[in-house]
Amino acid sequence: MLLADVRGQWLELDRRIAVFDKEFAAFAKENEDARRLTTIPGVGATIASALIAAVGDAETFEHGRDLAAWLGLVPRQSTTGGKPRLLGISKRGNKYLRKLLIHGARAAFPHIAERDTALGRWAKNLLARVHKNVAIVALANKLARIAWAVLRRGEKFTVKGLPLAV
């Protein structure tokens, strides 16, 4: 009897999650900023709606690095004698958005790295130098900066460096 109740609650939660997912997808289709954000690789309806809810039109951040720092996706710095030393990722800031961006970057990384674009070449070169998890967090940082630019400028993300079709 107890297991049947738990299973019923579990099924009800699954149903409610599916309803929320549909609402996020509908919001992403209706909202212009969300549509622009979903043109970024690794950014879907959930990330776009969370970014818009937390950041708005990104006017509060002067630079993309400020948004990435607010999310906790940049290295901490320690400076002595004018010589900056980069430490680990700060992990301060919005944990939920940081987690979403890292998962989005993890999903998009193979697709991005196989392309012959500026972003793809950057990802391949980075992966040759650092551990895969470090590269994924760096890509999440870059995606946050791209999201800031998309929100701030009001333009879709376009991939530069694609070869022209013949």
Image: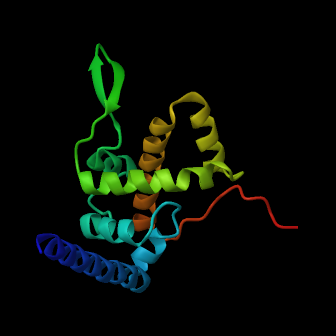
**Quadrant assignment for the N terminus:** bottom left
Considering only vertical position in the picture, is 122 above or below 151?
A: above
Residue found at x 48% / y 46%: 139
Residue found at x 46% / y 38%: 133
Considering only vertical position in the picture, is 13 above or below 117?
A: below
Residue 17 in the image: state x and y as whole percent. 28, 76
Q: Is residue 1 left or right of residue 15?
A: left
Viewer-proximal residue, 139 or 33?
139
Considering only vertical position in the picture, is 16 above or below 136?
A: below
Q: Is residue 87 left or right of residue 136?
A: left
Considering only vertical position in the picture, is 52 above or below 16?
A: above
Residue found at x 45% / y 64%: 43
**Residue 129 seen by the camera:** yes
Q: Is residue 34 left or right of residue 127?
A: left
Residue 118 in the image: state x and y as whole percent. 65, 49
Quarter assignment of residue 3: bottom left
Residue 150 in the image: state x and y as whole percent. 45, 65
Residue found at x 29% / y 13%: 81
Quarter assignment of residue 100: bottom left
**Residue 144 seen by the camera:** no
Residue 84 in the image: state x and y as whole percent. 35, 22
**Quadrant assignment for the C terminus:** bottom right
Which residue occupies the extreme left position in the image? 2
